[in-house]
């Protein structure tokens, strides 16, 4: 399924998804990178050693969830837009998703946007609570999106309705 559609199956996701006990402790990266490709900026971006150094450039990233603090440096570094941070402790009924975003204009903080799943389908709405876009992120912004907690494992993109979109 993944090779045909680019959308991971539940089995693919189970392989990389942090366990509920870790999710209950605070923000953590979810690395949805399923194919062996010559790429490693995620590992070099992580300053906490949470993504283990690659022995082979084609290795898939291995995350040590206990070292990860959810800083999202790896989110901005990934050319495949395959890394997200999920914080299920954000509030009583909301989770925070930090997701990569490469369209313009960037959404304003406080804006309500459509929350999309991995297939690009709208599954709900989210609130943009922060937009990180420093020069070091090299035009991959990181959007902090508050979503209903039950959508935390589904929401992986946004659509800023009513605004034109262009690749950056
Ligand atoms: S979120 Fe931060 S600490 Fe966690 S793997 Fe990514 S860069 Fe490392
Ligand atoms: S940077 Fe992204 S695409 Fe490259 S290996 Fe890491 S997670 Fe996969």
Image (cartoon, rainbow, N blue to C red):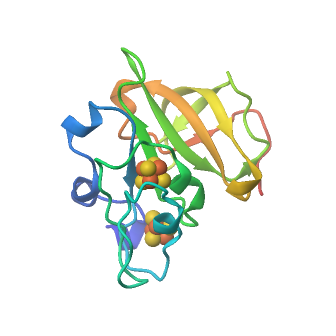
Residue at image location 31% in from the left, 65% down from the top = 62
Left or right: 146 as drawn, with respect to 129: left
Place residue 130 in its image quadrant.
top right
Place residue 12 in its image quadrant.
bottom left
- Residue 85, percent across and down? 44, 44
Residue at image location 54% in from the left, 59% down from the top = 81
Residue at image location 42% in from the left, 23% down from the top = 90
Residue 13: in sight, yes or no? Answer: yes
Left or right: 130 as drawn, with respect to 46: right
Q: In the rendered view, tell whether residue 84 sits above or below residue 21.
A: below
Which quadrant, please, contains the C terminus? bottom right
Residue at image location 74% in from the left, 29% down from the top = 108
Q: In the rendered view, tell whether residue 38 sits above or below residue 32.
A: below
Which quadrant, please, contains the N terminus? bottom left
Place residue 22 in its image quadrant.
top left
| Residue 5 or residue 146, whichever sits in front | 146
């Amino acid at each position: 399924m993944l090779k045909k559609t680019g959308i991971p199956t539940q089995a693919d996701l189970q392989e990389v998804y942090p366990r509920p006990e870790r999710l209950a402790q605070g923000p953590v990266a979810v690395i949805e990178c399923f194919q062996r490709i010559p790429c490693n900026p995620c590992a070099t971006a992580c300053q906490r050693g949470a993504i283990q150094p690659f022995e082979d450039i084609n290795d898939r990233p291995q995350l040590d969830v206990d070292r990860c603090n959810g800083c999202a440096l790896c989110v901005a570094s990934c050319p495949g837009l395959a890394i997200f941070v999920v914080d299920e402790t954000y509030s009583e009924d909301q989770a925070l998703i930090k997701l990569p975003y490469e369209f313009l204009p960037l959404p304003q903080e406080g804006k309500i946007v459509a929350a999309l799943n991995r297939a690009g389908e709208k599954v709900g709405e989210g609130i943009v609570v922060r937009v990180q876009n420093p020069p070091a992120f090299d035009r991959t912004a990181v959007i902090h999106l508050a979503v209903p907690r039950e959508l935390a494992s589904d929401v992986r993109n946004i659509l800023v309705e009513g605004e034109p979109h262009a690749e950056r």
